[in-house]
Image (cartoon, helix red, strand yellow):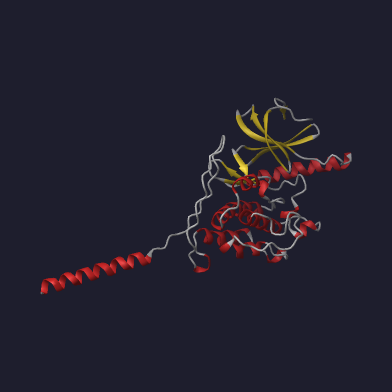
Amino acid sequence: MKEAEGALVGGRYRLDQPIGRGRAGIVWLTFDTKLHRTVAVKRYYLAPDLDPESAEQRREAALREGRDAMRVLHPNAITVHDVFRDGDDVWLVMEYVPSRNMADFLAEHGPLTPEQAAFLGVQLCSALAVAHAIGVPHRVVEPGNVLLADDGGVKITDIGISGRPPDPAYQAPEVARGEPATPAADAYSLGATLFAAVEGEPPFGPEGTGDQVVPRRSGQLTGALLKLLRVDPDLRPTMSDTVAALKLITKGQQNGVVPPTAPAMPTVQLAPRVAPQLSATPTRNRPATRVWVIVAVVVLVAAMAVFVVF
């Protein structure tokens, strides 16, 4: 069927208005007439040139992917409530989170600081680690699938959903060669996504096949990014290892060096939303100030002692 405002799918989900487009299809703001709640619903994308047998195989695969996605439960992952077939279409029902995707956010506000990108990475890695633990790779980690919520939260969407072909700029080399997506491929794609967030462009150009872009803004984040972008998937770190490394960066403890405090991301008034704030406040280190205070007190006491004696 062709989506239309007011249409009822699955016998209970009323399509109210389109609110975005992902690689898996158009996302609709939808009202669940059974549970009386607002959700987001997406019709699974099927390539129009598929023959009937191949199209049916893709529908069955979409149902399996949707059921796998329903098993991934994490505060930083968009929850999939339901997956169903309505005629020739497969639909995904997800939690609705007022947000914008990272690609749009970066286009409007520019690159993040290393600390902000590290903070973002911790949230995404944590969600991906849960998915990987139950055997569900994301398959398409890229800026368009990272949601920055209006309340300041971070969510990753489309976990386990293949949908449209991924953006080649964020695709792991082995996946580009036709190999299946794995947790290691997700690690590469996450590295490319964070690289673009802080450098303003993907690590190997828009097609993913150019020369390595020289990191100029990533600072103390550079080492973690280059590990994620290793060509050999066996040499890439796991999500859990990456979380540990990125947490040190957000606290300003990378390699035992405390970097300057990161400038706060400016608050930009939007209509009708306020730009999400990605805060990553490094630990402040002021032992030298306390030492000088103690020295000043000692000198003052000594001076008073000399005055009393004489």
Against 30, residue 206 (above or below) is below
Towards the viewer: 149 or 290: 290
> Residue lying farthest top?
6
- In percent of the image, x 77 and y 57: which residue is there? 175
Answer with left or right where residue 60 lies relative to residue 40. right
Give x and y (percent) for residue 306.
Answer: 15, 74
Q: Quadrant of residue 83?
A: top right
Against 169, residue 47 (above or below) is above
Regarding residue 226, the answer to whether it shows in the image is yes
Against 261, residue 143 (above or below) is above
- In percent of the image, x 53 and y 42: which residue is there? 268
Disc count in the image?
0
Answer with left or right where residue 309 lies relative to residue 221. left
Regarding residue 179, the answer to whether it shows in the image is no
Towards the viewer: 67 or 192: 192
Towards the viewer: 307 or 118: 307
The quarter in which the C terminus is drawn is bottom left
